[in-house]
Image (spheres, grey):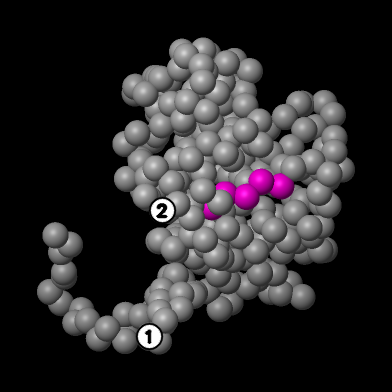
């Protein structure tokens, strides 16, 4: 059976330190910058802590401090040493989305799915989110190593069933095989998933291909989230090659963006 791979492109990657509890912070930062690229200079610029440090003017710190009605210095220290829950952070993400976009409907942009949800349902939620052009946050608790959080930006069908999820892991870890994660976890995972029906702005390009049982890759295509030609401008995936052919842009001279 062919294995499908679907990977969102140009997702930023930020790294936490060896002794902090910032995996949720950096996963949330990567998600925000994917949807709001202009925030890169506030949350990103490579391995951010090496350049400007972890500061109270940071949008995530400021929004959480405002929500908790506490001094930003305390919020910063607590998050650095103790971490934060996905349930609390998803509300902060919605607050930031409204402030950045000016759209009240974005107060329900990010959805939280907590403990007690089914593993199979969460696996489908992650796959559906990726296929809609929206990366998602995934958190879990293991019996031996404690909790962790990553940003999921792609998936590959397992050779014997199940799903490999491609992740931006703030700790530098590897991709996640869903069945193995279920075996080692204590309870069900937590998700923060953007609602594709609420989000009306840009989405990352996506690379899709299929791998034959012998390892041969076929039907590799790059897609872009694009409105169709109808008056309603219904959006969906369009193959990038087809978009360029429709535009009939000459190959030379090269065009510059101003």
Q: Where is residue 185 in the image (x, y as percent from the top left)?
A: 82, 37
Contact (CB < 8 A) between labels 2 and 1?
Answer: no
Screen quadrant of the C terminus: bottom left
* Number of marks in picture: 2
The answer to which quarter of the image holds residue 79 is top right
- The span picked out in magenta is 109-113
Q: Where is residue 76 in the image (x, y as percent from the top left)?
A: 49, 18
Can residue 18 be spotted in the picture?
Answer: no
Q: Is mark 1 on a helix, strand or loop?
A: loop
Front residue (pair 128, 172): 128
Magenta portion: prevailing SS class: strand
Q: Is residue 112 magenta?
A: yes
137 to 83, vertically: above or below = below
Can residue 4 be spotted in the picture?
Answer: yes
Residue annotated with mark 2: 103
Q: Which residue is found at the position 16% from the left and 70% from the top?
A: 254
Q: Is residue 171 magenta?
A: no
94 horizontally vs 255: left or right: right
Nearest to viewer (mark 2 / mark 1): 2
Q: Earlier in the sequence, mark 2 or mark 1?
A: 2
39 horizontally vs 79: left or right: left
Q: Residues within 10 Å of mark 1 (few under 14, many from 20)?
A: few
Residue annotated with mark 1: 231
């Amino acid at each position: 059976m062919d294995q499908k791979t679907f990977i969102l492109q140009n997702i930023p990657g930020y790294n936490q330190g060896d002794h902090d509890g910032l995996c949720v912070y950096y996963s949330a930062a990567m998600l925000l910058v994917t949807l709001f690229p202009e925030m890169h200079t506030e949350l990103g610029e490579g391995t951010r802590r090496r350049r400007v440090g972890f500061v109270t003017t940071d949008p995530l710190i400021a929004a959480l401090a405002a929500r908790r009605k506490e001094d930003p210095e305390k919020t910063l220290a607590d998050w650095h040493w103790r971490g934060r829950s996905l349930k609390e952070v998803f509300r902060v993400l919605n607050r930031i989305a409204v402030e950045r976009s000016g759209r009240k409907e974005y107060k329900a942009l990010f959805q939280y799915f907590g403990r007690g949800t089914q593993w199979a349902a969460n696996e489908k939620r992650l796959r559906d989110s990726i296929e809609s052009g929206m990366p998602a946050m995934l958190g879990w608790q293991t019996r031996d190593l404690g909790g962790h959080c990553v940003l999921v930006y792609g998936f590959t069908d397992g050779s014997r069933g199940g799903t490999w999820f491609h992740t931006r892991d703030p700790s530098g870890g590897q991709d996640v095989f869903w069945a193995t994660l279920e075996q080692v976890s204590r309870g069900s995972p937590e998700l923060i998933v953007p609602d594709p029906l609420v989000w009306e702005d840009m989405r990352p390009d996506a690379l899709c291909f299929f791998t034959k049982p012998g390892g041969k890759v076929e039907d590799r295509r790059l897609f872009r989230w694009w409105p169709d030609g109808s008056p309603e401008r219904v959006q969906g995936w369009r193959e990038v090659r087809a978009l360029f052919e429709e535009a009939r842009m000459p190959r030379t001279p090269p065009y510059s963006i101003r």
